[in-house]
Image (cartoon, rainbow, N blue to C red):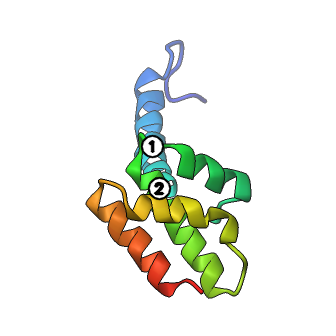
Amino acid sequence: MSSCPGAPCLPHRVSLFRCGSGAALPFLFWYSTWFGRKLSDSDLDAYFADRSKPRHAQRALVQVGERLSHGQSASRWYPQVIALANGSGLRVRQTAAWIVRTGP
């Protein structure tokens, strides 16, 4: 037997939606800002090309640094790293300098 006979259970659905979105939205925010997820080569190219979001440049720099620390080649992105090291954003410059310092 339904708890809402003859009437739609709108309050129950609304509360379920709120619980679901209350759990999903923080996860989606965390997932989009977390630097631990690996980026493909094409993602790295896109992140370096996106000048409107400094966070993308930082994330691409961190990924290049991780590749270097694991002995993988990242020479194809050296020009972008150097360009960002000479850029105007302080945090991006600091991250780029760290990559240049730790590189081969």
- Marks 1 and 2, how far apart at CA: 7 Å
Q: Which residue appears at 40% of the width and 26% of the height?
A: 11
Residue at x 55% of width, y 52% of height: 48
Name above or below for residue 63 compared with residue 40: below
Q: Amino acid at mark 1?
A: Arg
Q: Is residue 27 visible?
A: no
Residue 19 x %, y %: 43, 44
Q: Specify the amino acid type for callout 2.
A: Ala
Mark 1 in CB contact with mark 2 (< 8 angstroms) = yes
Q: Residues within 10 Å of mark 1 (few under 14, many from 20)?
A: few
Q: x%, y% of residue 55? A: 41, 54
Camera-side residue of 24 and 61: 61
Residue designated by label 2: 57
Residue 23: image location, x then y, percent: 45, 50
Q: Residue furthest left?
A: 90
Helix, strand or loop for disc 2: helix
Can the viewer see residue 12? yes
User: Which quarter of the image is occupied by the C terminus?
Assistant: bottom right
Q: What's the residue at 47%, 37% (across, down)?
A: 16
- Disc number for residue 51: 1
